[in-house]
Image: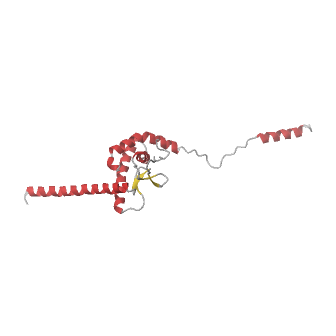
Amino acid sequence: MTRNAKIAALIAAGLTLAGAATYAVAQSASLISVALSEGQVGEQADGYLGIRGPSTSALRAEVDALNIKRRAAYTGLAEQRGVTIKDVAAATGCETLAKRVPVGRAYLMPDGVWRVRKAGETISLPGYCVS
Amino acid sequence: MMKLVPLLTAATAALLAGCVQVSAPEKPIEINLNINVKQEVIVRLQKDAQDLITSNPELFPQ
């Protein structure tokens, strides 16, 4: 194998890996978005995504992975502002419940009950949220 | 003097009846301010939370 052929092989291997990774990411995003549109996954008042009812381990893994990323983002902001991660997460939960739950999607309130937003319904936010 | 005794007794009884009995409560008095404190923190964080969502759209799929 010439030097150039080796480099070409390495590049090809790299591209294959990158392609696989992109595919995996696209795959995970679609798992969650399909579950969201079916009301199987929804936003929780605590600022994280949750699974409503039974789930597959693949979906559970994707939701967990996304929540870990959310927690990292909350942690950064909490440190900047000198508040708890829980407060940042709850403030974000107020926002997602207020603005990011379309009609037909599921959401979880602090009472632990999953609800589905009905047409024309405004979600009554937890008392600590800014109205 | 003999007249004074019943008078004094009556006065003492009246004084005692007029007393308001204050006894320390058995449980400590708790005032729950958690909700107000939480709301204040959330108000302060509202803008930050909005920015966090818009700058990390991949974390908030729809």
Q: Is residue A80 visible?
A: no
Instruction: Locate residue B48, reporting x and y percent.
Output: 39, 41
- The one nearer the camera, A101 or A79, is A101
Residue A78 in the figure: left or right of residue B11: left
In the rendered view of the protein, which quadrant contains the N terminus of chain B? top right
Instruction: Locate residue B15, reporting x and y percent.
Output: 79, 39
Q: Residue furthest right?
A: B2
Q: Residue at x 42, y 41 (%)?
A: B45
Q: Residue at x 27, y 57 (%)?
A: A24
Q: Residue at x 39, y 56 (%)?
A: A41
Against A127, is A6 above or below?
below
Instruction: Locate residue B11, reporting x and y percent.
Output: 83, 38
Against B51, is A113 above or below?
below
Instruction: Locate residue B50, reporting x and y percent.
Output: 38, 42
Residue B53 in the figure: left or right of residue B23: left
Residue A20 in the figure: left or right of residue B53: left
Q: Residue furthest left?
A: A2
Quadrant in which residue B49 is drawn: top left
